[in-house]
Image (cartoon, rainbow, N blue to C red):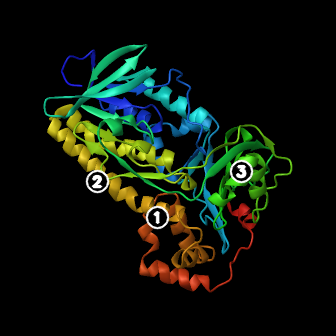
Amino acid sequence: GQGDAFDDAVDVVVVGSGPAGCATAILLGRAGLRVALLEAHRNENHHKRLCTHSIRSSGLPTLRRLELDGALERSGAVRSHDHAWTRHGWILRGSTDDSEHGYNIDRRVLDPLLRAKARGTRGVQLMAGCRVTGLIVDHKGRAAGVSAAIDGAERRIGARLVVGADGHASTVAQLASLPGKRWRNDRFIYFAKYRNIDLPPWRTTALWLLEPDVAYIFGNDDGVSLLAAMPAKDRLPAFRQNCEAALLALCSDLPDGPDLSAAQRVSDVIGATDYPSITRARIVAPGVALIGDAAMVGDPLWGTGIGWALQSAEWLSDAIAGPLLRGTTGDIDAAARHYQRRHRRNLAAHQMMNIHFSRTRRLNRVQRLLYAGAARDPQVAATALKVGSRNRSPLALATPAMLLRAALAARRPPPVPNPAAQATTGC
């Protein structure tokens, strides 16, 4: 719709109050801006269920900037470090430094915590039960706000920028003509939470690349462990017949895997049989910017969703806060394009590597070389884990020096056949 008669006027409308939306609202509110944070659900304790609850360590600096790391730990969040198994052996964290870690935390805890933090930030108005129905555009075609349905009535909210933080099926992206390309994923996902799984204290997050199937276990809050399976789609019939039995069968036979004989399920078995990756050629338009899953959906196998949501919120907020306070609409849109370039520079290589892996059943020759080297050489392992936790670019694994080091290490036998031997080192 067009026009300039608004029921409300703010600096920024953020659509969606998940991690991306809340982080943006908090950072922009702190900068002195007026933010309307719109959430379609009425219940402020609403949370995303299809999520394995793991935050990669790349998101830790943003959590600290939001002053949420302490609150998460008081709520039971588990400090998470990645470990990975391939047929070449375990890739283990060699350092006892705990400064770089992720978190495993249930979304039923994380989402309301973020929402409460946003609601308590000066300048932020959380509007629950508010569903966006359209973009308001000015005479130049630039977005100037949104129309939204609230309690059966239509309200027009004016803003200098509309931020789409409304997930993979983003209404804002559709209204702003920012289409996404869907990439086929040849795996599917099922997971559930269990008690009575005895995990070593160091094994907070463990991944098994079984080629083609993948399994995960996460040590979660409140003494709960989350088991996740991401098998190739030829296993779908077994999961459709009995998803829990198929999940336990896959996770019970993992090399050096957990003992599930006493496991007691304490949640539904949740899954998705079709989970494509989504990329967009553009994630900004005049007066509009997308963050989190609205900007890009990654393969759930790598658990990047929450971390990238937080990081993209921070990148956008840093880019636009100044122009929103002091600049013209042209300055705001230029800053949004700067954010788009930063998003692409930081995440595109990760996304394309993950998309490639989601469509292949076996590791390629270079991947086999790197994983074999990582199982034998601490420096190769450290780099592989930093790439996996999204703290370094995948290009760090493709340098001639790293490939040579991995090739030389791959010729040696693995020095530690069982990761339990690492438990005393604090890994």
Instruction: Return the x and y of residue 114 as percentages of the image width and height.
Output: 50, 32
Disc 2 and disc 1: Cα gap in Å?
19 Å
Three-letter code for the amino acid on which mark 1 is drawn: Met
Instruction: Return the x and y of residue 273 as percentages of the image width and height.
Output: 60, 49
Query: What kind of element bears circle 3?
Result: helix
Quarter of the image where the C terminus is located: bottom right
Q: Residue at x 30, y 49 (%)?
A: 282
Disc 3 and disc 1: Cα gap in Å?
27 Å
Q: Residue at x 34, y 38 (%)?
A: 174
Task: State the residue in front, 152 or 28.
Answer: 152
Instruction: Return the x and y of residue 386 as percentages of the image width and height.
Output: 51, 62
Q: Residue at x 45, y 42 (%)?
A: 168
Query: What kind of element bears circle 2?
Result: helix
- Does label 2 or label 3 sit earlier along the sequence? 3
Other residues around mark 1 within 10 Å, as few (<14) / some (14–19) / many (≥20): few
Q: On the picture, is 205 further left or further right than 130?
A: right
Task: State the residue in front, 365 or 44.
Answer: 365
- Residue topped by disc 2: 341
Q: Are marks 3 and 1 in contact (CB under 8 Å)?
A: no
Other residues around mark 2 within 10 Å, as few (<14) / some (14–19) / many (≥20): few
- Residue topped by disc 1: 353
Three-letter code for the amino acid on which mark 3 is drawn: Phe
Task: State the residue in front, 325 or 181.
Answer: 181
Three-letter code for the amino acid on which mark 2 is drawn: Arg
Q: Are marks 2 and 1 in contact (CB under 8 Å)?
A: no
